[in-house]
Structures are given as C-alpha cells and as structure tokens.
Amino acid sequence: MGRRGVKKHLKRLAAPRHWMLNKMGGIWAPRPSTGPHKLRECLPLSLILRNRLKYALTRREVIMVVMRRSVQVDGKVRTDINYPAGFMDVVSVPKTDEFFRLMYDVKGRFVLHRITKEEGSYKLCRVTRVAKANKATIGRNPFQTGQAGTIPYLSTHDARTVRFADPAIKVNDTVKIDIESGKVVGHYKFDVGQLVMVTKGANVGRVGVIVHKDRHPGSFDIVHIRDRKGHEFATRLSNVFVIGEGNSPAVSLPKSKGVKKSILEESEERRGGKRSE
C-alpha cells in the first residue's frame, strides 16, 4: 500500500538553503503546512520564532507561544507552528508591539525587516491572474445566468482573491492591499521606469528600475533592470515584483537597499567596520 495524503516530514539536507539551517543540527527540519506560499518560497512560523526572532529555544516553546495566540501573520492569528509565511507577509507580535515584513536580502535569504505599525497595516501583492468566473469561491451575479452571471476577479501571489477589482489592473501589476479590510487601496503598473525587486533566480533580492522589456513568444520574456549604482542585469519577467514608482519604494527596504556588492566591496566594508571598532 502506498503513501496516502500529504507528506508530513522534511529532511534537514533537503530544506531550502535560504532557511540557513545548520547541517549538523539534527535529521529533520520543520515541513511547512500547505498554504498561500510554496514550500521552497516560504519560511515556517517555527523558524521565524526560534531561529530568527529568538522568542523560543525549542519546538515545544514555539508551540506554547503560538497556542497563546501571540503571533499574527497579515493581521490574522496563526496557531500552526508550520504556517508558511512568504515574501511581503507582515508578521506581528501584538504583545510586544513589533511588526516585521518578510523580504529578501541580496544573497537570496529571507530577512525579517522591522517596520512601523503604520507600514504594517498594508502589504504589496503581485497579480498572477485576472479573469471572470461564477465559481463558489468567487460568487456570481444572481440576476444573470450563464456567462452573463460571471463576475470579474483577480488572484495574487499570496493566494488572495479580490472581486470586482479595477479593470485597469493587469497581470504582473502590483496592488497595495489594506490588511484589515482586504481591499485594494493602491495600484502599481508593471512598466518601464517602475521600481522592482527580483524574487527568484540568480539576482534574487536585488532592487532596480526597469529599463527595457524583451518579448520572446514561445519562450520566457526578459526584463532588463538597472540598480542605484548603475549596474544592469537581466532576469525573467516572472521573477520581477513591482515595489514602487520611479525611485520611491512603497515599502521600506532592508539594510542593503537591494544593491549587490562585489566580493572586494564587502571585504572593504568589513575591514572598515573593524577599524572603527
């Protein structure tokens, strides 16, 4: 008899590199529950509380923290220690009045970027689908039948469904979502001149302005990006996430501001820090 249901285990060596788990820390790693983000594009709540924020020392302590309903993800209490939090999610701890946004650094690792309460009231979501439907999950127009009874909706990268969205919003655009109400309060078009962050591929975590888009019918469309230092790089269109207009991001950025440094620049920075100490 074969395996039934979802897998419930994950070996430590098979865990994503950006979780930064030490190889000799045991056999197993926490396997993320099924949720809005893919297994290799998320960070389980247990690793956030234990390895990153240091609110717990063991898995048992993580369970005690979440079962007291002390942790929220995007404004909702989560009691599953393996809940998958992903890019742009807001993790909050109301008892300590702390808010963090999950972002990438220029080396492709998740960073818990500390933000203010005002900034923690919204998040950016990439539009992955725009369509019409009359499914049970979407709803329907009760005064029409058939195709006329369908209603417009859009889906985002974190599995949200927004009904009756602005017709100007297209796939690959970014919408600003108010976390409390779940409504769209802003719209950033995917176009040349917009500020973007790369969320996949070799350039993950880098921030820059779109300078050109290449269409490749039957293959992958390519986007050319220029960062603050004038360095240009290219990546697939599906790897790009619009985070603002021009040079002004809609969310605050982590320490490096999305600028990748060379090995020599990093070495010089470390030496300068040691001299100042």
Image (cartoon, rainbow, N blue to C red):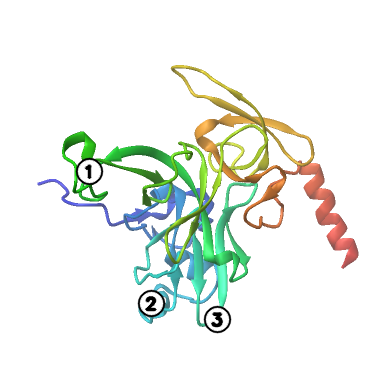
> Mark 2: few, some, or many residues within 10 Å (few <14, many ≥20)?
few
Q: Position of residue 274 (x, y in %)?
A: 85, 62
Relative horizontal placement of residue 3, taking residue 246 as reference (left or right): left
Residue that label 3 marks: 96
Are the residues flagged by discs 1 and 2 in contact, CB closer than 8 Å? no
The numbered disc on residue 228 is: none
Q: Amino acid at mark 1?
A: Asn
Callout in the foreground (3, 2): 3
Spot the residue most to the top.
217
- 16 or 11, nearer to the observer: 16
N-terminal of the two: label 3 or label 2? Answer: 2
Are the residues flagged by discs 3 and 2 in contact, CB closer than 8 Å? no
> Mark 3: few, some, or many residues within 10 Å (few <14, many ≥20)?
few
Callout in the foreground (1, 2): 1
Relative horizontal placement of residue 265, taking residue 153 as reference (left or right): right
Number of numbered labels in the structure image: 3
Q: Amino acid at mark 3?
A: Thr
> Mark 1: few, some, or many residues within 10 Å (few <14, many ≥20)?
some
Residue occupying the point 39% across, 48% down: 38
Residue that label 2 marks: 60
Q: Position of residue 17 (x, y in %)?
A: 51, 49
Q: Position of residue 226 (x, y in %)?
A: 71, 34
User: Circle 1 — which element?
Assistant: loop
Spot the residue most to the front.
143
Residue 263 sits in which quadrant?
A: top right
Residue that label 1 marks: 134
Distance, label 1 to label 2, CA atoms, is: 44 Å
